[in-house]
Image (spheres, rainbow, N blue to C red):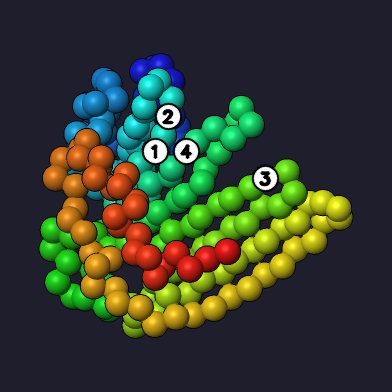
Amino acid sequence: MSEEGTLDNILTLSLENKPTAEDKKHLNNAEDWAKYSFDNDKEYYVTFFKDGEPIACVNNYFRKISVTFLTYNNGELFVYLYMIYNKEKGAYNKDVDGRIFLRQFELYDEDADKRITNKVLFRDNGIMNVETITETKRPEFSMNYEEKETKVNLSHNWIRKPQNYKDYEYLLDYQNILKPEYLDLP
């Protein structure tokens, strides 16, 4: 997206065409907006590329950071993993200074015959709630929904907060963030 398009999206989508006087000072370019937003808990996006292709998009918002992992599937951009980190204190751990909490992730798998969506939510009491939705497309459409809960250790769900407006690359290392017991999914 062009710089002009990016700034227009910030203005229309994030600020709902109602920027404050201070917001307007930082809408000169996307990098100025990102620096200002990081320091003032305003929304902004960072997109990561590899070999010219987008691989992840990070949305930093005042209460959360979300990471959307992208790949191409049959020539179309496809989301295969989505992770949400809370930036606020919760009942599970009152001392979160300098850390964010992996609250939720969603895994998607799709082929010509079916689509599987696994939504995993970590609750403050140490319970991992897993919803699995399987949509079968062939030979005829059907949908199956399963839900299960498991007690898990959430201490490793806490990781450091980003240190500046572009410090998100470590959040792309989902293989080391998602623990094996979280991935007992179809």
Image disc number at residue 54 = 2
**Observer-nearest of 125 and 80:** 80
Query: Is residue 15 among the parts visible in the rendering?
Result: no
- Residue corresponding to mark 1: 57
Mark with earlier residue (2, 3)? 2
Gap between marks 2 and 3 measured at Cα: 21 Å
- Is there CB contact under 8 Å for labels 2 and 1? yes
- Residue corresponding to mark 4: 70
Q: Position of residue 13 (x, y in %)?
A: 45, 36
Query: Is residue 99 among the parts visible in the rendering?
Result: yes
Neighbours of disc 1 within 10 Å: few (<14), some (14-19), many (20+):
some
Report which quarter residue 116 is drawn in: bottom right
Q: Position of residue 36 (x, y in %)?
A: 20, 35
**Observer-nearest of 117 and 60:** 117
Neighbours of disc 4 within 10 Å: few (<14), some (14-19), many (20+):
some
Mark whose residue sits in front, 1 or 4: 4
